[in-house]
Amino acid sequence: QVQLVESGGGLVQPGGSLRLSCAASGIMFRIYTMGWFRQAPGKQREFVARITSGDMTYYADSVKGRFTISRDNVKKTLYLQMNSLKPEDTAIYYCNKDENWGQGTQVTVSS
């Protein structure tokens, strides 16, 4: 059974940083492309970033240059380092593998 558990969200001021983590279990983590998505209030869920098994990374234009996705295959953990956060980054952030989703972690950027 695939389980994805996000953590690391919270309240941060504009310009601040957060690092999200996603602990995976029930899968051979290292062979899968993993991703982060987010959903802001009243909006559809949107792609943020993904990383392939070969460590190729892809980002939404809105976060390029500010966010960094990475993975630790030994720990079976996916990360999202978020810098220079903006109020428009406020959303619930979800870890994703194919049709599997975590429960999400809230990120609020506000002064």
Image (spheres, grey):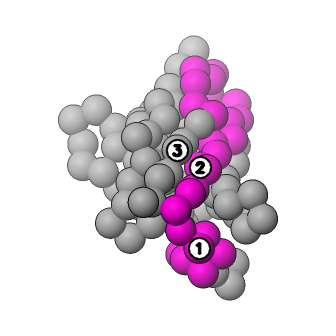
Q: Quadrant of the N terminus?
A: bottom left
- The local secondary structure at tag 2 comes to strand
The answer to whether residue 14 is left or right of residue 105 is right
Q: Quadrant of residue 63?
A: bottom right
Q: Nearer the viewer, mark 1 or mark 3?
A: 1
- Mark 3 lies on residue: 5
> Which residue shows up at 58% across the image and 21% down it?
11
Identify the mark at residue 7; answer none if there is no mark: none
Q: Nearer the viewer, mark 1 or mark 2?
A: 1
The amino acid beneath tag 3 is Val
The residue closer to the viewer here, 45 or 21, is 21
> Which residue shows up at 56% across the image and 57% down it?
25
Q: Residues within 10 Å of mark 3 (few under 14, many from 20)?
A: some
Residue 4 in percent (x, y) is at: 49, 51
Counting residues from the start of the chain, the first of labels 2 and 3 encountered is: 3
Q: Which residues are magenta?
A: 8-34
Q: Are marks 2 and 3 in contact (CB under 8 Å)?
A: yes
Q: Residues within 10 Å of mark 2 (few under 14, many from 20)?
A: many
Q: Quadrant of residue 104?
A: top left
- The local secondary structure at tag 1 comes to loop
The answer to whether residue 47 is left or right of residue 72 is left
Identify the mark at residue 28; answer none if there is no mark: 1
The residue closer to the viewer here, 44 or 28, is 28
Q: Quote the CA–CA distance across marks 2 and 3.
A: 5 Å
The amino acid beneath tag 2 is Cys
